[in-house]
Image: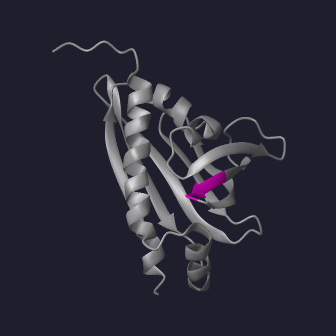
């Protein structure tokens, strides 16, 4: 597989939210709160005494797919309030897996959030990833999971917002 494959996003999605960019960022940059909105991730805990979303901070994600369970270690790479939150994902033994990025752009009184995922795993690891997660079509699964997460994000941020029309 050529290196160019890793330069292209693996999965992406976008949604318009009736919330200020800073408000969206506060939720997006809170990994334990975002775990409640995700599809595979069920819980997050900060590592190395980290407690806030800052570049270099690490957290562990606990994931599930049916009876399968696995953990990943994440390191925040971008923490630009109101604009971008991103992190790299690795196995607990530090093998790169992926990158997740949330870009937030103002849109009137609200914002547009784009969630993007890139593959970073070495090719030899991909069959093991299928065995661990039980997911044969990871790009398709991640695209579906992104859509679900973004919809839940929108619903959570727009709770209690009165709308006319």
Q: Nearer the viewer, residue 42 or 151?
A: 42
Quarter where residue 155 is shown? top left
Which residue is at a point 47% across and 46% down the rendered structure image? 102
Q: Nearer the viewer, residue 43 or 12?
A: 43
Along the horizontal axis of the image, is 165 left or right of 24?
left
Q: Main secondary structure of the magenta part?
A: strand
Which residue is at the far front?
67
- Span of residues in magenta: 62-66
Which residue is at a point 49% across and 69% down the rendered structure image? 135
Q: Work out which quarter of the rendered image holds the C terminus and state it.
A: top left
**In the rendered image of this protein, does residue 18 appear above or below residue 142?**
above
**Membership of 63 in magenta stretch:** yes
The picture places residue 164, in percent across and down from the top left corner, at: 20, 12
**In the rendered image of this protein, does residue 94 appear above or below residue 65?**
below
Q: Nearer the viewer, residue 56 or 157?
A: 157
Along the horizontal axis of the image, is 122 left or right of 4?
right
**In the rendered image of this protein, does residue 164 appear above or below residue 80?**
above
Count numbered badges in the picture. Answer: 0
Which residue is at a point 50% across and 39% down the rendered structure image? 37
**Membership of 3 in magenta stretch:** no
Quarter where residue 127 is shown? bottom right
The picture places residue 66, in percent across and down from the top left corner, at: 55, 58
The picture places residue 19, in percent across and down from the top left corner, at: 39, 24
Along the horizontal axis of the image, is 144 left or right of 72?
left
The picture places residue 48, in percent across and down from the top left corner, at: 84, 47
Quarter where residue 91 is shown? bottom right
């Amino acid at each position: 597989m050529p290196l160019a494959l890793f330069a292209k996003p693996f999965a992406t999605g976008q949604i318009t939210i009736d919330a200020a960019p800073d408000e969206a960022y506060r939720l997006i940059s809170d990994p334990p709160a975002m775990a409640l909105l995700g599809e595979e991730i069920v819980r997050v805990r900060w590592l190395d005494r980290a407690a806030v979303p800052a570049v270099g901070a690490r957290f562990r994600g606990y994931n599930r797919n049916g009876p399968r369970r696995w953990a990943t270690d994440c390191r925040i790479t971008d923490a630009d309030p109101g604009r971008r939150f991103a992190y790299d994902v690795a196995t607990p033994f530090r093998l790169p897996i992926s990158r997740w990025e949330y870009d937030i752009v103002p849109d009137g009184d609200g914002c547009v959030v784009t969630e993007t995922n890139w593959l970073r795993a070495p090719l030899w690891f991909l069959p093991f990833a299928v065995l661990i997660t039980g997911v044969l079509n990871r790009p398709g699964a991640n695209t579906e999971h992104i859509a679900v997460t973004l919809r839940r994000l929108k619903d959570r941020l727009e709770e209690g917002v009165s709308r006319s029309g």
